[in-house]
Image (cartoon, rainbow, N blue to C red):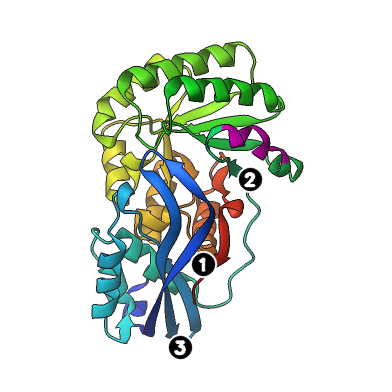
Amino acid sequence: MYRTQPETLCETYSFTFYPYRRSLRHPLATSHGTWQYREGIFVRLTGNRGTGWGEIAPLTDFGSESLSEAVAFCQQLPKTITAETIFAIPHRLPACQFGLESAMEDIGELPPLPSLQYSWLLPTGEAALSAWRSPYEKGYRTFKWKIGVTHFNTEQKIWQQLLQELPTDCQLRLDANGGLDVDTTKAWLANCDRMRKNHQPPIEFLEQPLPPHFFNTMQDLNQQYTTPIALDESVATLPQLQDCYQRQWRGIFIIKPCIAGSPSRLRKFCQTHEIDVVFSSALETEVGRKAALRLAAEVNPSRCVGFGVDGLFGKEGGK
């Protein structure tokens, strides 16, 4: 963890940045649309203690700054910056906060990445019916499947078949990315509850069924059904996370560290409040992934982290 004592705030770094684009092997369909590629920025800081790398990986649909805003911010920074400058990055630039602060934390000799349990992201549609087999053989037992992408009845048929195919030692996460309406959410929750009673492979949770402004509805539904609801887009940034906690959400929080904001502030909040948390990928590169996983290990979540996305990308561009 980076030292934040007052005497380190004036530590100076040489700053450079490098935009990147990486293509997906196959398009990823979500309720936000279809992803063809991922864009972001690598940042490098060089100081007296060595060199550190960080990654700015915005997700505008989740409430972070846009890539163009992040590039503009990097362009206006001087070639030499201080830790104080980095800690003063405003909350409207959460991906920039994470990228630059994690670059500071990357400087120096770091311990090996800890061992964590991962969930695996399945492809949408019928492709999921066979795509679980290879990761299962590699030891994955938690899988995630995107819903709200096509017609409800079509997804229900595929989902029920998937539950029949999955071994009983597996569990499934359903992720709607805020793309359902209230009636469809109730239908999914009711069917999930029924499957749990029938001893099917359990549904761990239904992730962000409704848009963030339906917070009160999701709060009520989380109490009415036995299948838990997890918030994702609603808690994308640290200020949003704090707001939902203050509004008495005590369910599951999905945190994408690369867009959440300052890692030191996020770490402190999670450790102070002991929330039920799943750390999840923002489809960042290995640079941001390492920083996010180190943070997850320090917080020590009880649930599998959502970083099983290795099969999504082809050749990676970058630094």
Residue denoted by label 2: 117
Q: Residue 263 magenta-drawn?
A: no
Q: Identity of the amino acid at label 1? A: Val
- Contact? badges 3 and 1 (CB < 8 Å): no
Taking the image as shown, residue 169 lies to the left or right of residue 58, namely right
Question: Residue 314's image quarter?
Answer: bottom right
Nearest the eye: 162 or 185: 162
Q: CA distance from mark 3 to mark 2?
A: 36 Å
What residue do we see at 31% from left, 24% from top?
Answer: 181
Which residue in the protein does label 1 denote?
287
Residue 73: image x %, image y %? 25, 72
Q: Chief secondary structure of the magenta span?
A: helix
User: Looking at the image, can residue 197 be seen?
Assistant: yes
Dot 3 or dot 2, earlier in sequence: 3
Q: Is residue 127 magenta?
A: yes
The residue tagged 3 is 48
Q: Where 276 falls versus 290 (above or below)?
A: above
| 10 Å crowding of disc 3: few (<14), some (14-19), many (20+) | few
Q: Secondary structure at mark 3?
A: loop
